[in-house]
Amino acid sequence: MKSTFKYLYFLSFILLITACSSDDSTEIDEEKPTITVNYTTGFPQGCAFLTRGETYNFRAMVTDNSQLAAYSIDIHHNFDHHTHDDQVRDCNLGALQQAENPLIFVENYTIAGSKTSYEINIPVTIPNDIDTGDYHCAYSVTDATGWQSRTSIDIKIVE
């Protein structure tokens, strides 16, 4: 019985040591993906005017050093003139207003395969009955290890 106990103790000790060893051959992804609309067909550009009833292709380029996993598009009103931490361009904002029937568009998408670059290209129709005024278009991209990047663009929806 004592030899069985010693054997199990020794085996547990060996398993514990091998389970805790590090594998230096595994690379750790420490780089966030990138996202930009600053290219010829990127849309919308900062301070763009979008007309109710029209359909627009929202386009952004996303890249990652390893593998992309997902992205999202979020279009929401900016009637209170809030900002996002990554906005670069200041646009002329309209008067503060109360939301009555604002456009709210939030969609999430996966990126299939092991891609390191991908162009987002999503058609969005601006409904005829939504509030006009200041809005934000926010893009977000996540890589396979969970790193995320975001960018927000000021837009204005008009009649």
Image (cartoon, rainbow, N blue to C red):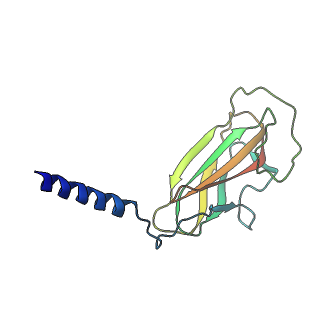
Residue 158 against residue 65 in the figure, above or below: above
Please tell me whether residue 82 is drawn above or below residue 11 in the rendered image. Answer: above
Determine the image quadrant of residue 10: bottom left
Q: Is residue 159 visible?
A: no
> In the image, 105: left or right of 70?
right
Q: Is residue 77 above or below residue 70?
A: above
State the residue at coordinates (75%, 45%): 51
Instruction: Out of 24 and 152, give the one closest to the viewer.
Output: 24
Q: Quadrant of residue 59?
A: bottom right
Q: Going by the picture, which residue comes out furthest to the left?
A: 1
Residue 8 percent across, percent down from the top left: 20, 55
Report the residue at 34% width, 64% height from top: 18
Count of numbered circles on the image: 0
Residue 97 in the image: state x and y as whole percent.
Answer: 81, 28
Residues 47 and 15: in front is 15
Q: Quadrant of the C terminus?
A: top right
At 60% across and 59% down in the image, what residue appears? 121
Residue that sits furthest to the bottom in the current view: 25
Tell me residue 65's x, y (percent).
59, 69
Asked if residue 5 can be seen in this view, the reply is: yes
Q: Is residue 14 left or right of residue 151?
A: left
Given residues 19 and 77, the one toward you in this image is 19
Measuring from the top left, give residue 142's x and y in whole percent.
Answer: 57, 56
Q: Nearer the viewer, residue 136 or 56?
A: 136
* Side of 16 relative to 4 (left or right): right
